[in-house]
Amino acid sequence: FLLTAIMFAQVYGDNGKMKEYHYSGPVEHRFSPYSFNGGTVLAVAGEDFAIVASDTRLSEGYSIHSRDSPKCYKLTNTTVIGCSGFHGDCLTLTKIIDARLKMYKHSNNKSMTSGAIAAMLSTILYGRRFFPYYVYNIIGGLDEEGKGAVYSFDPVGSYQRDTYKAGGSASAMLQPLLDNQIGFKNMEGVQHLPLNQEKAVQLVKDVFISAAERDVYTGDALRICIVTKEGIKEETVPLRKD
Amino acid sequence: MALASVLQSESVDFSNYGRQRHGFASGLYEAELGLESVGGDRLSFALSTSCSNGDGPDRKIEFLHGTTTLAFKFQHGVIVAVDSRATAGSYIASQTVKKVIEINPYLLGTMAGGAADCSFWERLLARQCRVYELRNKERISVAAASKLLANMVYQYKGMGLSMGTMVCGWDKTGPGLYYVDSEGNRVCGDLFAVGSGSMYAYGIVDSGLKQKDLTVEEACDLGRRAIYQATYRDAYSGGQVNLYHVHSEGWTRVSQSDVLMLHQQYQAEKA
């Protein structure tokens, strides 16, 4: 009698409800060529500068693979790209872009401009239309006139030029804040002050600190690349490590 | 294929793996890829990446969709009006997308469906139109341009391209308007609205076009109003209304109006 009572408890669990786990038959496990490694990227274009910033956390599922894996890659003296999404595709894509940049340099005897790199990246991404690079790209740099330029992409190559853009895991949290602070959206009767470099850098730091608070895939450290006509300056700022 | 010849194909081993998988999977979505869903439905492409594998959230690669575009012929040419919102799932990726692609000074193409698909193929169309001009020493007709586009995408039918576009222009036979999509449809007509907000736009344009002989001003207002109403009711449309007018000299960019401003303007007019 006691034995059946114990078995009863095991099958039915503590609260009287049937336990969920049961063998339902053969299960097919599909290999997925993608994985999501997290990370957030942000780019802001100013009058004569551009900022590309990314966090440095590399995660997968519930684990963190690395706390020092920045997602900004320098392409030329006037262009930086930020790539987030699947790290494997980020690496391959940046290798391909570097190779194409070299080829262009050798054929045309000059560096590619930011706009040209953006157009080229669009066709590179679309070339894999039916098995995409799982990467969210944002290019930041200076255009031919020396003005700041930001180009944002989707995984298959649709792109456009923006003033500011956030991409990656915390993009939905950052973008509205940028819309408000840089685009002056949803504010009436405010003076539209142009963005200077110090304010922009401070805004980027604040925005990432907020993102690290609420997005699990963002944190550890922030890498900021500031592109001006003098060159590219890098700055690292610590973020929450939890 | 056209795609491989234009680009140096970087993909090696995985490409066949990918292609077979999607060739099959996209068949499942075939039924949904009707005119209605070309616009803003949750077209999660065949790549519903099951990279969950038990850990972390289920992530889908989301491409940009969702739109309202319309074009209609009238006495003085063709009016083309579009919104400017791009969505990735339920996230608004951008409110400032250029959905009218300027193929050449007398041909316009609109964008609905997958943003990358539209911009890529229409850019390729621009190249083909230029080649035609150089070979034949005359401008390409709207019918021929739309046929080139339709034939290009027909080769990829069933593989998951999502594109619903209108080719608008003026050639020696007068104003031309064709609807071309990734299913292989190519239809000549006087009025088209494409995208998730198309039904709302049709309502406005159909009632406005009843009065014959619109002036350019009235036609522009009608186009603007139609897109505005569509953005009002369709969640996947919004941003700004971009208006173009195609006439015998080519196309002109008439206006770019923020939907919020239009709303205040129409409210004031009602009062």
Image (spheres, coloured by chain):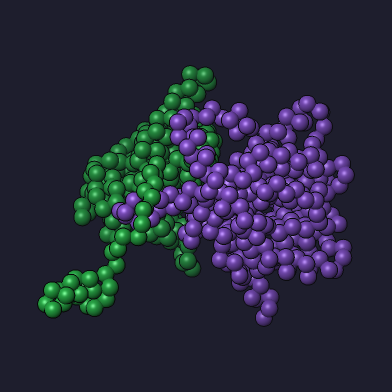
Spot occupied by residue B231 in the image (x, y as percentages of width and height): 61, 65
Asked whether residue B22 appears in the rendered view, the answer is yes
Left or right? Give the position of B6 relative to A205: right
- Residue plotted at (24% across, 48% down): A64
* Residue B207 or residue B184, whichever sits in front: B184
Spot occupied by residue A118 in the image (x, y as percentages of width and height): 50, 37
Above or below — where is B196 with respect to A68?
A: below
Spot occupied by residue B128 in the image (x, y as percentages of width and height): 70, 33
- Residue plotted at (50% across, 43% down): B21
* Residue A18 or residue B231, whichever sits in front: A18
Asked whether residue B195 appears in the rendered view, the answer is no
Give the colour of chain B.
Answer: purple
Left or right? Give the position of A63 relative to B28: left
- Name which quarter of the figure residue A181 lies in: bottom left
- Residue plotted at (24% across, 43% down): A66
In the picture, one chain is green; tell me its letter: A
Toward the bottom, the furthest residue is: B271
Q: How many marks?
A: 0
* Residue B235 or residue B24, whichever sits in front: B24
Image quadrant containing the N terminus of chain A: bottom left
Toward the left, the furthest residue is: A2
Left or right? Give the position of B76 relative to A67: right
Spot occupied by residue A139 in the image (x, y as percentages of width and height): 44, 41
Image quadrant containing the C terminus of chain A: bottom left
Left or right? Give the position of B35 relative to B217: left
Above or below — where is B34 with respect to B180?
A: below
- Residue plotted at (54% across, 27% down): B8
- Name which quarter of the figure residue A84 lies in: top left
